[in-house]
Image (tube, rainbow, N blue to C red):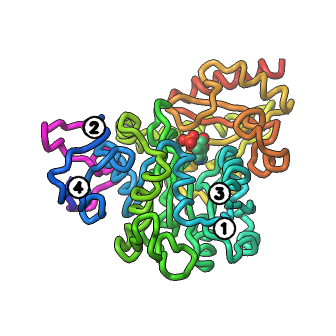
Amino acid sequence: MSDGPTYGFDTLQIHAGARPDPATGARQTPIYQSTAYVFRDAEHAAALFNLQEVGYIYSRLTNPTVAVLQERIATLEGGVGAVCCSSGHAAQIMALFPLMQPGCNVVASTRLYGGTVTQFSQTIKRFGWSAKFVDTDDLDAVKDAIDENTRVVFCESIANPGGYITDIEALAGIADGAGVPLIVDNTSATPYLCNPISLGATLVVHSTTKYLTGNGTVTGGCIVDSGKFDWSANDKFPSLSEAEPAYHGLKFHETFGPLAFTFHGIAIGLRDLGMTMNPQAAHYTLMGIETLSLRMERHVENAKTVAGWLESHDLVDYVTYAGLPSSPYYERVAKVCPKGAGGLFTVALKGGYEACVKFVDSLEIFSHVANLGDARSLVIHSASTTHRQLTPEQQEAAGAGPNVVRISIGIENSEDLIADLDQALNTAHS
Ligand SMILES: Cc1ncc(COP(=O)(O)O)c(C=O)c1O
């Protein structure tokens, strides 16, 4: 697609980054299943390794199929560049890697996917990094948590599992005031529902495993750079602002300007961490992303209908869907996710843990799986699965207590989903 007029989202989700294959004319993006690429000559090889020319060397770094997906997601998010990697969790480590050093910390929301809470509270300690968890609705607490060793503020736009909406603009203002970037995990919202960069985020991360692929086939991740952060404004980010010994003294910010983070992610992040997306995965995600807006509209429509029905059910305590007027986040949806509150929420059942386990075992259309964002409706009891490693206090803070079931609403007929939920609720209480 040429740099021409600005196209709408539906056009870009199909065309951005792709053009007919120059060798064959293939209209669909081919799966370039090749590990390496032949250099034109020795001079060409040297220019590629020196980052003086952009091209393909080795598929741990770059691959033409993956490159189309990177450009597609960067365009949809309104960023200047993107780096795809092997999973959403890989994207999070890859996003932190250029910014952190031993002794540095991340100020992170308490409302995050359970795996991210574990990654941040336990695993990153091995790198000498740490996390401070705060309720991001308490903006003073966020400000207080930031200290001289903080390098990042991290949140989810629509938080898994509760579907809570984060005030991205307010957090971006605080992060900006402290001279650090805001990273937003936009997995549950997707760029169709939420555009964190337009609300002030520096970086956006995705588990492309979820809605972007949309069919439950492959794991993947992506980091999108807004290109707007001045990495040289203070001395907190030497890997970007100063001579980087891991790339023979290259100064990434000085050399690549707004693309510094993206080049660093490929030239050092993928080169040395090796969390690479494979071209088959990129292909499946490219297939899925073509219909993103259509699917997200249906996810939102179905979620509103099903959550509203559940809320009025006798056997239900409460439903957390932010698209319901009863939600404390209802007003915020219009500002953060103008096209809707997504398809993810939790339902608290009367009867607690026992009722929840019986309920998930009784569902027929809904699959009991550790996933979300599929075309299929999915369900999971977070406290005994995805949020199992968390303390009871962390589970409550994340909205994943023992009486709560997470629901990822698919794009089936909503009346069929309601009938299935109804029979399972009745069985759970029989
Ligand atoms: C919001 C969110 N972020 C990140 C991840 C991690 O993604 P992946 O499973 O692709 O590593 C998940 C996984 O469920 C998630 O829900």
Residue 374 pos. (x, y %): 52, 33
Q: CA distance from mark 1 to mark 3?
A: 10 Å
Q: Which residue is mark 2?
A: 32
Q: Which residue is mark 1?
A: 104
Q: Is residue 296 above or below residue 235?
A: above
> Is label 2 in contact with label 1 (beta carbons under 8 Å)?
no
Disc 2 versus disc 3: nearer the observer: 3
What is the secondary structure assignment of the residue under circle 4? helix
Question: Which of marks 1 and 2 precedes in the sequence?
Answer: 2
Residue 180 pos. (x, y %): 58, 73
Q: Is residue 254 above or below residue 304?
A: below
Q: Which residue is mark 3?
A: 127
Q: Is residue 68 visible?
A: no
Q: Quadrant of ligand 1?
A: top right
The part of the chain drawn in magenta is: 4-32
User: Residue at 30% of width from left, 63% of height from top?
Assistant: 51
Q: Which residue is mark 4?
A: 45
Q: CA distance from mark 4 to mark 2?
A: 20 Å
**Is residue 232 rendered magenta in the image?**
no
Q: Nearer the viewer, residue 218 or 316?
A: 218
Residue 255 pos. (x, y %): 35, 74
Q: Amino acid at mark 4?
A: Ala
Question: Which of marks 3 and 2 precedes in the sequence?
Answer: 2
> Is label 3 in contact with label 4 (beta carbons under 8 Å)?
no
Question: Which of marks 3 and 1 precedes in the sequence?
Answer: 1
